Amino acid sequence: MPEDSWAEITEEELQQLEYVEDFDLPHGISTWEYDVVRLKTDTEEGGLRYTTSLLKRMGDKGWELVNITPLGDENGPRYGIFKRIWDQGHGDEDDS
């Protein structure tokens, strides 16, 4: 999280974030990581090609498409919501 974003977080929220960061789940319980990616529309230049390529790349990296949804009004841009089983080896990579 960028340093300038911390100004918006209360002390209580910061304590909760620190707790969650140190929280370890018992072995055998699956945890998920999520990624949200803006998709281009078919009417945008190269939109279909971009979206097809994006979906393939995400799948190759183990991401499963969960939903496609507009944020805001239904005519706004669509976002793909992806999930995969969380593995600490993926956590710090920029692979979206």
Image: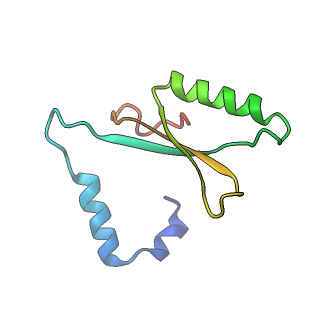
Q: Toward the viewer: 2 or 35? A: 35
Task: Give the image location of residue 30, x and y in percent.
Answer: 25, 36
Task: Give the image location of residue 37, x and y in percent.
Answer: 59, 44
Q: Is residue 3 left or right of residue 31?
A: right
Q: Quadrant of residue 87?
A: top left
Residue most extreme to the left: 26
What residue is at 60 percent from the left and 29 percent from the top?
Answer: 55
Q: Is residue 77 above or below residue 86?
A: below
What residue is at 86 percent from the left and 38 percent from the top?
Answer: 45
Q: Is residue 47 left or right of residue 93?
A: right
Residue most extreme to the right: 45
What residue is at 69 percent from the left and 33 percent from the top?
Answer: 51
Q: Toward the viewer: 12 or 75? A: 75
Task: Give the image location of residue 29, x and y in percent.
Answer: 19, 37
What residue is at 55 percent from the left and 29 percent from the top?
Answer: 58
Quadrant that contains the C terminus: top right
Residue most extreme to the top: 60
Q: Is residue 19 left or right of residue 17?
A: left
Task: Give the image location of residue 10, x and y in percent.
Answer: 38, 78
